[in-house]
Image (tube, helix red, strand yellow):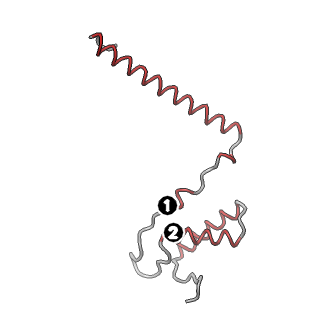
Amino acid sequence: MPRGDKSKYTDRQKRKAQHIEEGYEKRGASKARAERIAWATVNKEEGGGNKSGSGRGTKDTHVSSSRGGHVSQQHRTHAERARSAKKAAHTREQEHEKRSRAAKKATNTRWHGKKAA
């Protein structure tokens, strides 16, 4: 079998590699680079070709797929970044208030013998 032969890959693996390749080409990678990355991803996730036989091969991990597709900070508009930052700040503020109320409540009961309201 010559080097680079894809005959031992299942049809599903070939479709998966094609899909990954198209995604990289859309993002501006060259055809050759996109193809290399696609097959490397399939190999990493599935351990190479799993041709013939039910249940043969190793279980797929999908490690690489879980990392892909995330929108990086550079591709978001200023408004999107600002909205996200504002939401995060609001959440932090709410958590801080919640912790403060809990601490105050615990202090009232512990030191003054009062029941928390």
Going by the numbered disc 2, the residue's amino acid type is: Lys
Q: Residue at x 53, y 73 (%)?
A: 13
Disc with the residue nearer the chain's start (2 vs 1):
2
Circle 2 — which element? helix
Task: Please give the label number shown on residue 47.
Answer: none
- The reply to whether dot 2 and dot 1 touch (C-beta < 8 Å) is yes
Please indicate whether residue 114 sits to the left or right of residue 12 in the image: left
Q: Residue lying furthest front in this view?
A: 111
Q: Residue at x 29, y 16 (%)?
A: 110
Q: Residue lying furthest bottom in this view?
A: 1
Q: Quadrant of the N terminus?
A: bottom right
Residue 46 placed where, x, y %?
A: 48, 70
Q: Quadrant of the C terminus?
A: top left
Q: Nearer the viewer, residue 113 or 29?
A: 113
Q: Residue lying furthest left in this view?
A: 113
Q: Residue at x 69, y 73 (%)?
A: 32
Please give the residue where the numbered disc 2 appears in the rendered image. Answer: 44
- Relative vertical location of residue 2 with respect to residue 45 in this rendering, above or below: below
Residue 8 placed where, x, y %?
A: 51, 82
Residue 109 placed where, x, y %?
A: 30, 15
Q: Nearer the viewer, residue 36 or 112?
A: 112
Going by the numbered disc 1, the residue's amino acid type is: Val
Please give the residue where the numbered disc 1 appears in the rendered image. Answer: 63
Please indicate whether residue 74 sits to the left or right of residue 50 in the image: right
Please indicate whether residue 63 sits to the left or right of residue 4 in the image: left
User: Dot 1: few (<14), some (14–19), or many (≥20) neighbours within 10 Å?
Assistant: few
- Relative vertical location of residue 79 with respect to residue 102 in this rendering, above or below: below
User: Hey, which quadrant is residue 67 in on the image?
Assistant: bottom right
User: Dot 2: few (<14), some (14–19), or many (≥20) neighbours within 10 Å?
Assistant: some
- Relative vertical location of residue 64 with respect to residue 78 in this rendering, above or below: below
Circle 1 — which element? helix
